[in-house]
Structures are given as structure tokens and as C-alpha cells.
Image (tube, helix red, strand yellow):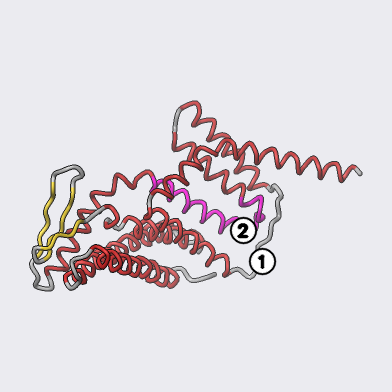
Amino acid sequence: MIMEQQMTLKKWVSLSVWIIVTIIFYPITLWVLRNTIAEEQLKHSLLVLGFAGVALAMERKERLQFIMEFGEKSTWSLVISFVLVTVSAFFKWPLAMMMGYAFAIYACALYLLGEKFWRGIAALVIAFSVYMVLVISMPIFDWPLRGASAIGGKWMLDQTGLFSHLSVQFQDPIKLLLWLEEKPFEVAAECNGFGSMSGAILLAILLGIYRRGSFLSIIGAVTLAILISYLFNILRIFSICLFALGLPETPDYYFVMHEIVGTFYFWGCILVLWCVLRKCYPSR
């Protein structure tokens, strides 16, 4: 009887704790969801993280099941989360709130799945924390990435012997144009390669941490991810421009071609990087 009462009390205490956690982190959860839904590139990068997490989970022989018990790691992670939230509230530090949110997600996952999966969960949570930073930094890197992509695409087009040049239209909104044989192509926000680059970065971080790579090796993997994603993005721009020269002057044809080519190079980039990183970080 006493044991049953203790178990019932334990369940109610756990439920109360997670209700409090949900209320505290509801605003930042809503912020992440709104930004992800609003930006196609962010959805793609989060999708990459999800697919990679599932692929790594399938490598384990052990079956995932719900434990729903507090352990030492989950308890301390929750304590650290509450401390960071308190610091954020007193000193108005958004970064402390984001770190607290990450620790809360880590504690929740450990509580649900058990602490024997702590390394895989930690890798996913760290990668998700980087994702939140990328959400904030997306507007900052938009124009630098557009410029770099346009320059790289123009260089590749120049190698074909076709005439190309860049121009900027100073109107509202400002447009960066890549001209090929006097035909203009706008290098818009979706052409900056942020989606593939952020997805590649998250993949490199996830694999590097999960496979116990050193700090320097993870930095190297992230650098490689940036270079590969940049190469694939300028190949995407190069291909779209060349294909568009042979298409009829109708928006429908261009849109379909644009989406097919973009999807091909996005997932091609992720697949190539996945194969390279799995060679660099073999399963242990």
C-alpha cells in the first residue's frame, strides 16, 4: 500500500514538474515553431536534423522505449535549466533562456527514454541549440551569402564562354541580378544557400558529437560542410541559369524547373556530406 502511494506521489510530482516546464518554455517553443514554419530553408535544415537523428537511432541494437523516470543526469539538467531561466529573467539574457530551453529538452528526453541514451540525446540537443542560433542569424547572413553565391555562380557560367555579369537594382526591395546572355535572374533570399548550409552544419555537428569526434575534427567537419554546401549551391544556380535559357518564356516552366533542380542539389549535398562524414566518423 505504501509503495503504491509512493509511486502515485512520484507520478504526480513528475507531471507537475513537466507542466511547469511546459508553461515556462511555451513562448520560446512558439518562437521556434513560428520561425521554422515561416522560412522554407529553416524547415529543410530541421528536416535534415530529424532524418539524421532517426538514421543514427536505427544503428543501435537496443529498442527505444519509454522509461519515464528521473535519473541523476535528467534531474541535474532540469536544475541547470531552471537556474538559467532565473538568470535570464533577472539579467534579460535571451541566450541564457535558449540554453535553459536546451537543458530542459535534454532532461525531458532522458526522462522519457532513459539515461543510457544520453550521448545520442546530447548530440541531438546540441545540434538543435545550434539550430536556434541559426534561426537568429539567418537575416544577418542573407545578403553575404547571396553575394557569395552570385559571384560563384557567375564564375562557373564564365567558364562556359557565355556572357554573364552582376548588377544591383536599388529599389524597394533591393534586388541582386545575375545576367546571362542579357537574360536577368534574381538571386533571391531562397538562392543564398542558407538552407543547405545550415542543414549541412547541423549534420556535421550531430555526427561529430555522436561519434565522439575531437573538437578540432568537428570544426573541420563543419568547415567541410560549409564548403560542400556552397559548392552545391553555386552548381544549383549554374544549372538553373543554363536550363532557363532553353525554356519557354513562361513562369510555370521556370518554377517547375527551379524546384526540381533546387531539390536535387539540396538533397544531393546532404547525401554527399552524409557519406563523407560517415567515412570520417565510423560507427563504434
- The number of numbered discs placed on residues in the rendered structure image is 2
Residue at the far right: name it. 1
What segment carries the magenta color?
109-135
Seen at 55% across and 39% down, the residue is 25
Classify residue 27 as left or right of residue 158: right
Seen at 30% across and 58% down, the residue is 193
The secondary structure type at the circle numbered 1 is loop
Question: Residue at label 2?
Answer: 117
Where residue 215 appears, as percent x and y from the top left, is 42, 56
How far apart marks 2 and 1 lie (CA) works out to 11 Å
Q: Nearer the viewer, residue 154 or 223?
A: 154
The secondary structure type at the circle numbered 2 is helix
Q: Is residue 228 magenta?
A: no
Q: Viewer-nearest of labels 2 and 1?
A: 1
Where residue 192 appears, as percent x and y from the top left, is 27, 56
Where residue 39 appears, as percent x and y from the top left, is 38, 50
The type of residue carrying mark 2 is Phe
Classify residue 176 as left or right of residue 89: left
Q: Is residue 277 shown above or below 7?
A: below
Q: Nearer the viewer, residue 109 or 196?
A: 196
Task: Indicate the quadrant containing the N terminus: top left, top right, bottom left or bottom right.
Answer: top right
Task: Indicate the quadrant containing the C terminus: top left, top right, bottom left or bottom right.
Answer: bottom right
Classify residue 4 as left or right of residue 27: right
In which image quadrant can residue 166 be found? bottom left
Q: Nearer the viewer, residue 113 or 222?
A: 113
Residue at the far top: name it. 90
The type of residue carrying mark 1 is Arg
Where residue 244 appears, as percent x and y from the top left, is 20, 68
Near mark 1 (Cα within 10 A), the count class, few <14, some 14-19 or many ≥20, is few
Q: Is residue 32 shown above or below 157?
A: above
Q: Could you tell which of marks 2 and 1 lies nearer the N-terminus?
A: 1
Question: Residue at label 1?
Answer: 63
